[in-house]
Image (spheres, helix red, strand yellow):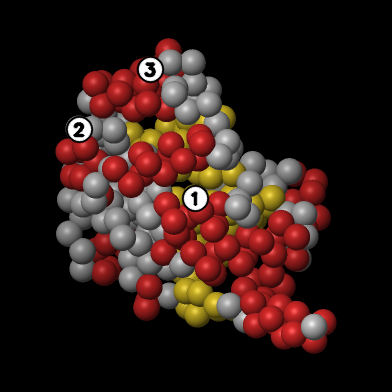
Amino acid sequence: MNQTKTIEKDFQRQKSGYIHSVESCGTVDGPGIRFVIFTQGCPLRCLYCHNPDCRHLEDGKLITVEQLIREIKKYTSYFKSSGGGITITGGEPLMQPEFVQEICQRCQEMGIHTTLDTSGYVQLKVAKQVLDFVDLVLLDIKSFDPKIYHDVTSVSIEPTLEFAKYLKEIKKPAWIRFVLVPNLTDPIPNIQALAQFISTLDNVEKVEVLPFHQMGKYKWEQLGYDYQLKDTNPPSPELIEAVKNIFKSYGLETQ
């Protein structure tokens, strides 16, 4: 029986998945210093995506969970001193649920904090098995108005809203991320509706308002994609502050 368990454990450790890259000491994707894993593959086609090279699964690098764990272990002292851990982002990590689950489970076994950065565009039955091993979810809600959401992402908002409600149901700590794009996601009714929705989620610890930027524009050009926001400027400090104040008016901690 013990030999069988050993064989099964070894098999689990050979689980592999496709990643784009890793960042060893990230500081913007969750608390503290974090080992950030950028997974490959995404079902969304966000107009402002700064990782368009993560779209297709087959373009990634195949790597085993064990290889990642060996790298992650090198940074445990940084995690402990800063309250950090690992963050799995993308792309969309939940396109590779078994791979992501195994990474998170192994990290939790080592006492390492796990964060999942996701759009929530996934069937709940797929996500549930992963969320059991996730300490914090960074949920990107691109818009609340269904038309704007579709214009931004080319997909429906409904799976993301259901995902958000499920996080509340299981009391999973979450941060909501909203990208503020002038003349796209900035209509006041859209932001007010999003703030009202988030205010019903008592598991949400804070809202991050992320100003639009064009840092990924060169990737779109290199890949031959049509970057439709090339004439869009970043939001002004005044607009950013006004949007933050809307979220704050609904009792939400905002940064």
Question: In the image, residue 34 lies at what x, y percent?
Answer: 64, 52
Look at the numbered disc 2 and give the secondary structure of its residue: loop
Question: In the image, residue 177 lies at what x, y percent?
Answer: 44, 38
Position above or below: 108 against 71: above
Q: Could you tell whether 78 is left or right of 98 in the image?
A: right
Q: Residues within 10 Å of mark 2 (few under 14, many from 20)?
A: few
Three-letter amino acid code at disc 2? Asn
| Mark 3 or mark 2: whose residue is earlier in sequence | 2
Give me the C-alpha separation between circle 2 and circle 1: 25 Å
Q: Quadrant of the N terminus?
A: bottom right
Residue at x 75% of width, y 85% of height: 4
Three-letter amino acid code at disc 3? Ile
Question: In the image, residue 90 lies at what x, y percent?
Answer: 44, 59
Give me the C-alpha separation between circle 3 and circle 2: 17 Å
**Residue at image mark 1:** 117
Q: Could you tell whether 153 is left or right of 129 in the image?
A: left
**Residue at image mark 2:** 183
| Mark 2 or mark 1: whose residue is earlier in sequence | 1
Residue at x 23% of width, y 32% of height: 145
Look at the numbered disc 1 and give the secondary structure of its residue: strand
Q: Residues within 10 Å of mark 1 (few under 14, many from 20)?
A: many
Three-letter amino acid code at disc 1? Asp
- Disc marking residue 246: 3
Residue at x 63% of width, y 46% of height: 135
